Image: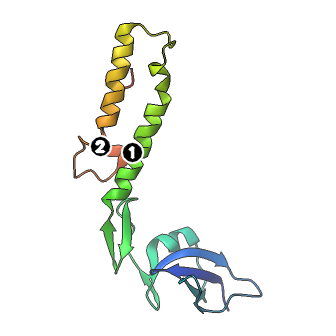
Amino acid sequence: MIYYIAIIKDSQILTLKMASGKNEPEGLREDGSTVVHVDFPIENKFDFISSHYWDGEWKERPLAPNNFSRWVDGTWVWDQEDLMNEIRGRRNNYLNRCDWTRMDDNGLDDDDREIWAIYRQELRDITENLDTNIQNINDVVWPESP
């Protein structure tokens, strides 16, 4: 009995869906992914996806140490660039939220305008001043918004 259909790419489960009466056959697909029939019940498919990979057979793996690690050749590999992209994205959101302070008719006096300018510069500099050992966006020390 087939319980689930797994779509695998580079040993990772891309999709795990319930089997139906008409299932795609096992094997390599045109897009390079592989279809694998799962012939056993899975209690929680999200836990299964997090804790298993396909290497010709199902194998267990430890949970990812953070959101910026990728499973490569049987081990978790740190991806610093993914973390930096998320940090830049959050930084850009903070900058967008205070763009109004740069407008001529914003209602701020000169002192407040300068305080906001300093804050914005601290945000722009955040990626240059990061500790290189940082592994989580929650570990970033963001400047205080005025």
User: Is 87 drawn above or below residue 117 in the view shown?
Assistant: below
Q: Is residue 86 above or below residue 92?
A: below
Q: Residues within 10 Å of mark 1 (few under 14, many from 20)?
A: some
Q: Nearer the viewer, residue 39 or 91?
A: 91
Q: Is residue 95 left or right of residue 111?
A: right
Q: Nearer the viewer, residue 129 or 105?
A: 105
Res. 93 visible in picture: yes
In the rendered image, residue 101, in percent from the top left (x then y), is placed at: 46, 20
Locate residue 13, reporting x and y percent.
52, 76
**Residue 143 in view (yes/no):** no
Instruction: Give the residue at the far front of this rendering.
Output: 104
Quadrant position of residue 143: top left
Crowd class of label 2 (few under 14; some 14 to 19; many from 20; radius 10 Å): some
Q: Is residue 39 left or right of residue 23?
A: left
At x 43%, y 87%, the residue is: 55
In the rendered image, which quarter contains the C terminus? top left
Labels in figure, total: 2
Whether residue 135 is situated above or below residue 122 in the rendered picture: below
Which mark identifies residue 127?
Answer: 2
Q: Which residue is mark 1?
A: 88
Instruction: Give percent across and percent down for residue 63.
Output: 39, 68
The amino acid at mark 2 is Thr
Q: Position of residue 83 (x, y in %)?
A: 36, 54
Front residue of this view, candidates 129 and 77: 129
Residue sitting at 31 percent across and 44 percent down?
Answer: 139
Going by the numbered disc 1, the residue's amino acid type is: Arg
Q: Is the C-beta separation of discs 2 and 1 under 8 Å? A: yes
Q: Secondary structure at mark 2?
A: loop
Per the rendering, the mark at residue 78 is none
Q: Residue at x 47, y 70 (%)?
A: 50
